[in-house]
Amino acid sequence: MPFADQTLLTMGLAIFLVPLLAFTVLIHFGSRLPKGGDWVAQAGIVTSAVLALTIFWNVIVGLYDPGWTWWSAEAGLSWNWIDLADLKLPVGLYLDNLSVIMLTMVTVVASCIFFFSAGYMHGDPKYPRFFAYLSYFCFAMLGLVLVDNLLFLFIFWELVGVGSYLLIGFFHEEEEPPRASLKAFMVNRVGDVLFLLGIIIAWQLVGTLNYPAMFEALAAGNFPDPASRAFSSLSNHQLLTLSGVLIFCGAISKSAQVPLHTWLPDAMAGPTPVSALIHAATMVAAGVFMVGRMYPWFTPEALMFVAGIGAVTALVGATMGLVSFDIKKVLAYSTMSQLGYMMLGLGVGGFVAGLFHLITHAFFKACLFLGSGSVIHAVHSQDMRDMGGLRKKMPRTYWTFLLATLALAGVPCFAGYYSKDQIVANALAWGLSHGAAHWVPFLFASVGAFLTTFYMFRLVFMTFHGAPQNAEKYAHAHESPALMTIPLMILAGFALLGGGTMNPLADVDHLWFNELVPAPASAAAAGLGLAVESAEDVAHHLHSAHYPALFTSLLAIVAGFLLARRMYLVKSTDPAAVTRRFGPLYGLVVNKYHFDDMYGDRGLVGGLKQVNGALAWFDRNIVDGVVNAVGLAGRFIAFVMGLFDKYVIDGLVNSMRTLTRLCSSIFRLAQTGNARDYLTWTLVGVLILAFWLA
Amino acid sequence: MVSPQDAVVVGSGFAGSLSSYLVVSGGLFLLGVTCVLVRRNALYVLMGVELILNSANLNFVAFARFGGYGMDGQMVALFVVILAAAEAAVALAIIMRVFNEFGSVDVTRTDSLRD
């Protein structure tokens, strides 16, 4: 044990609370601080990074123990969020090798991006607020990684969603960003509602939401009697599968999987450092991390669903990347496709492969996005048709970008190779051992590998090679300042070395990540008593799949590279001719498979609008009619009561008045106002008294 | 003891009974009241009041003379004369105001107190 429990708890809390502190300071005083307060945000994230690296150094490097976990509840350091008689929701921190690696990745990538942003956003009127939002996002993301239960993961999940919303819509004076941010937020709502339903079902099945306790309860198989719970017609197995699928639905929206991926390309309307941090390295990867965290929970059927969605996303994303001319959109589709690969890897049983790819991808994709940011900063355009030949003007950007591209394509020796290759190998092993339709993930992954190489080199060639396509923009282009290129170099370094080795034939079982983050045993299988493939069988299939997969991948990479070179570097084939030949297919891809149309005004949203119109009609005519009828009835009763008041009550009062008036009209006859009359009556009175008394 | 009605005053040149004084006084009073009640002109009303006051004076003096009450009656009569003078001054002032206000001194028209 490298740390005392109390120390580890303090460090864990500090890692995500320090950025929150930075956010609080910046949002209130940011504009009054010198230099817009960027140093506050940078100091905050660097503090987090130092703490994360300290833990990393002591735990990962120092202990190198695959089984290392630390749960605050076991150390007696939990806190009850809700504490009622029979309902307790304890909250604490949970650390294992995976979360320590995630923390390190997030804080290091974020630190690079924070410094890069200081250059990229320089002179922006909302500069302090940008750093406030970035800090806020880091707080939410790090909290998501650190917490020990599904409910708080969900809460932080929503908080990162807010951060994403704020940052996509950062340039809210323009037309596109607010729309894109709203779209991202709304599309994510769909997945999040399903995610919450999955959590509720999970709660019903095991009565706890802390990961270790959940898996323990699941593995013990103590399910409630189906008759006593909701969905009593579903067996425990079916309900568990449903729960897994619903939980994965959260990841579908957050990690931009088909069919809820449409927000990610639009999210590129945000500032480029945001795209790098949120929409490439961290937030979108949170879905993959969550599936990894919940891995023991998934039944084989749920995992098959994960694999299917991942495979489709990998291919769909890659094809859409082929046809875009917006440098950031190409990278966005690439991100989507790579997230598909990760899901595919997890789904086919490649727990290690999927999560390893999450880590390596974060570094090189952040590098690619920052590189594109550097290019955009130089030419003030996102359209690749405005670029070309920038290699000579921006050598540092070019070389780091190229390294990251090689890593993304999965060229041997680079970080991406080790992770992506494992995914393909796992997909092949899955196909080999299950047969039939289970070949689909491998097939899609291989085609995807070809397409990935193709669109990435298309991007590199169009941007950095060839003749400048826009002479004026080329003339003004210049290399970015060191503040921006040094983060690029750091990230490119990780893209080169993230695999932990440069030997392409290294035994995958002894890669650092494979050794440190072993696949957990399936609690679902244990709890339901399902037969699992023995470890030897898995190893055997993987072993026999490794070289064929490697060969396929290499073939795909070489083919992709050669095709891209032919079409975009030597230009012996005209891309326009190719698009003409594949006209209908090209149209389908350019229109993003009509997903946006499906959701848009002539699809889902339009349909909902019509339903809403019908409901509004019902409201206006039926509900309002009933309400108005009740109102009219009230008015009628009030009218009758008014009559009673007017004629009976008021009549009584008025008759008193009339009576009084009548009497007084008699008596007032004596009041003539004429002094002589009074005198006369006085005299009469006196005479009467005189005679009477006499 | 003799009653005031039939006592005979001795020691003066004038002889007569109390009743004759009271009859004159009563006549005077009736004339005054009639004047007050019948005449419309405020000045005549004022004169009627004077007649009433003087009939009362006559009564005071007559009772004092025939009742053996010393000079009390005469004293009161003197006060009444002074009072009448003051009253006449005030009443004339009021009549002036009434004339200004109503344009006449007709007492039947000064009935605005009724409302």
Image (spheres, coloured by chain):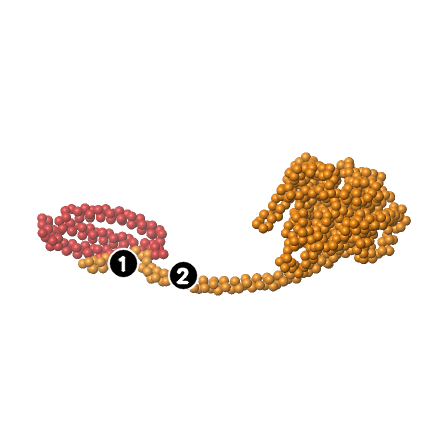
Across and down, in percent, residue B2 comes to 10, 52
Note whether residue B10 is visible: yes
Are labels 2 and 1 assigned to the same chain? Answer: yes
Mark 1, Cα crowd under 10 Å, few <14 / some 14-19 / many 20+, is few
* Marked residue chain, label 2: A
* Marked residue chain, label 1: A
Across and down, in percent, residue A601 comes to 72, 57
| The hue in which chain B appears in the rendered picture of the protein | red
Across and down, in percent, residue A498 comes to 78, 41
Q: Tell me the mark number nearer the camera, choosing from 2 and 1.
A: 2
State the residue position of label 2: A653
Which amino acid type corresponds to the residue marked 2 in the rendered image?
Val
Q: Which image quarter is the N terminus of chain A in?
A: top right
- In depth, the one of B58 and A502 nearer the eye is A502
At 74% from the left edge and 38% from the top edge, which residue is drawn? Answer: A61
Label 2, secondary structure: give it: helix
- In depth, the one of A23 and A222 nearer the eye is A222
| The hue in which chain A appears in the rendered picture of the protein | orange
Q: Answer with left or right where residue A641 lies relative to residue A256.
A: left
Name the outermost residue toward the right.
A572
State the residue position of label 1: A681
Across and down, in percent, residue A119 comes to 74, 38
Mark 2, Cα crowd under 10 Å, few <14 / some 14-19 / many 20+, is few
Where on the picture, by quarter, is residue A143?
top right
Label 1, secondary structure: give it: helix
- In depth, the one of A444 and B69 nearer the eye is A444
Which amino acid type corresponds to the residue marked 1 in the rendered image?
Trp
Label 2 and label 1: CA atoms lie apart by 36 Å
Q: Which image quarter is the C terminus of chain A in?
A: bottom left
Q: Answer with left or right where residue A618 lies relative to residue B1.
A: right
